[in-house]
Image (cartoon, helix red, strand yellow):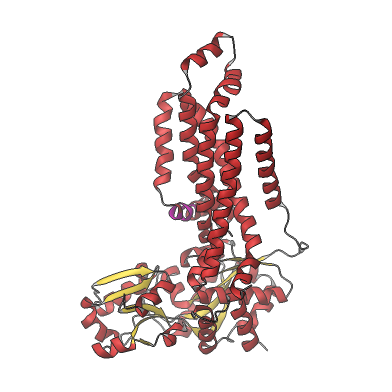
Amino acid sequence: MSPALADAALDLPQLLRAHAILSGAAVGLAILAGLPLAWWAARVRPVRVPLLAAAGLIQTVPTLALLALFYPALLLIGSATRLPVPALGFLPALLALTLYALLPILRNGVAGLTGLDRSVLEAADAVGMTGRQRLLQVELPLSAPVLLAGIRTAAIWTIGAATLATTVGQPSLGNLIFSGLQTENWVRVLVGCGAAAALAILVDALLAMVESGVAKRSPARMAIAATLLVLGAALALMPAAGGASERRPVVVGAKNFAEQYILANAMAQRLGSAGFPTLQREDLGSAVAYRALAAGDIDVYVDYSGTLWANVLGRSDTPSAATMRAELVRRLRARDGVTLLGPLGFENAYVLAMRRSRAEALGVRTIDDLARRAPRLRLASDIEFLGRPEWRALRKAYDLRFADARAYSPTFMYRAIADGSADVISAFSSDGRIAALDLVVLEDPRGALPNYDAVLLLSPRAAADPDVVAALRPLIGAIDVRHMREANLTVDRDVNKSSPAEAAKRLLEAIVP
């Protein structure tokens, strides 16, 4: 077995289990909510149109946006009620997927119940059936095939959409897909996609068996399919192998690029060596990661001083690195109870970079030079950059106006400049691909971009645990940019790739005595 496949296979059982629990819970809740609503809408015509319209409107919201919108909504609810409402992880994913699964169940339920032959219903009334008897003995059995078709559709949609739950910190098969895309580990992508597809096909086949059992009035067929579904649910809910630790797991957060995966694994390995069980929440956006830390949904992650300065504090000035860190320490603790434990020792700044041959041909060495050429050049950025204050500061300082500006995931942004689809990218200064692709970083003579020291942040709960602090403190000031670039490149390069966990292990061996 290849190392990449072995690595993906190691993560697969836990992620498949989490994916099945989330999808099953969402479809189950959608059935519990959808069937009574369908019955109500089938009987009360004035309710039917607005109810179906509302469910259809929810379906028009992209699943990723629906997942993201529950995060601030739950934060507001928690703040208003002063209850410990988890805004990250299982709850927002469950609520979003339940809403997403509701429409096919509701629509098919209404269609099944309103499409019944009137003469059959009149016959039921004529023999003296009560409303409950008519529903259970006539309406539901006759409309069951249509209802089950809606449930099958909802199940397939939900299992596929659940891969996006990774973006709000809920482990799912999306972890394999997203991390594989960011590190160009296509084996992980294929394993994640294949497992999600196999799960959807299996569940659909079992539900089809129930449907055919209903149509053929075969109790045995229905019982076999129902038993297999129950066994699958029981297997997913069975506690994972290994004894439970008496310690609460420390939740390690990470954004969505290789360096963050490596640092998250390094912190998890340090905490694991100190006896802490750990959970990792990866692929978080910058704003989500910080808010999750402040709310206690994650305990520790690495951010960058310039990002915190501009995005969290809303500052546009560019003081020295020491002044910026001192202000961040004071303001983050006072405002959110967040502890900035210290800088890791390297900077990962936003920089503008070009292929060396292209920059030399155009005579571009600084961003001032670039501004004169920009109207004929194409910019590729990561997904966040064009909406960040740093981009606005660059445009204001240099009056940058490109012929085209497109956002990519970091992996494809580097691919775009490598294959000539872009002339300039918003690179990361600690990325090993700058050297590997022979890119040149453009000088910023007007100092428009702030300092981006990598800093380790702790939630109020983690900062209060001296053992957590002791496990992580050796990382402070220990990682220079050379070691970080080497670690990043081992994950990002095309051949002889390492997993983030392997890169983290080697990084720790190199920097911590």
Q: Nearer the viewer, residue 372 or 288?
A: 372
Residue 66 belongs to magenta span: yes
Location of residue 454 in the rendering, given as x and y in whole percent from the top left corner: 51, 79
Location of residue 193 in the rendering, given as x and y in whole percent from the top left corner: 53, 60
- In the image, the segment drawn in magenta is 64-70
Q: Quadrant of the C terminus?
A: bottom right
Q: Is residue 235 depicted above or below 213 in this figure?
A: below
Q: Is residue 40 visible?
A: yes
Q: Residue at x 26, y 80 (%)?
A: 398
In this picture, residue 449 sits left or right of residue 150? left
Prevailing secondary structure class for the magenta stretch in the rendered image: helix
Q: Nearer the viewer, residue 268 or 1?
A: 1
Q: Residue at x 59, y 55 (%)?
A: 19
The quadrant in which residue 392 appears is: bottom left
Q: Quadrant of the N terminus?
A: bottom right
Location of residue 508 in the rendering, given as x and y in whole percent from the top left corner: 63, 83
Location of residue 324 in the rendering, given as x and y in whole percent from the top left corner: 46, 80
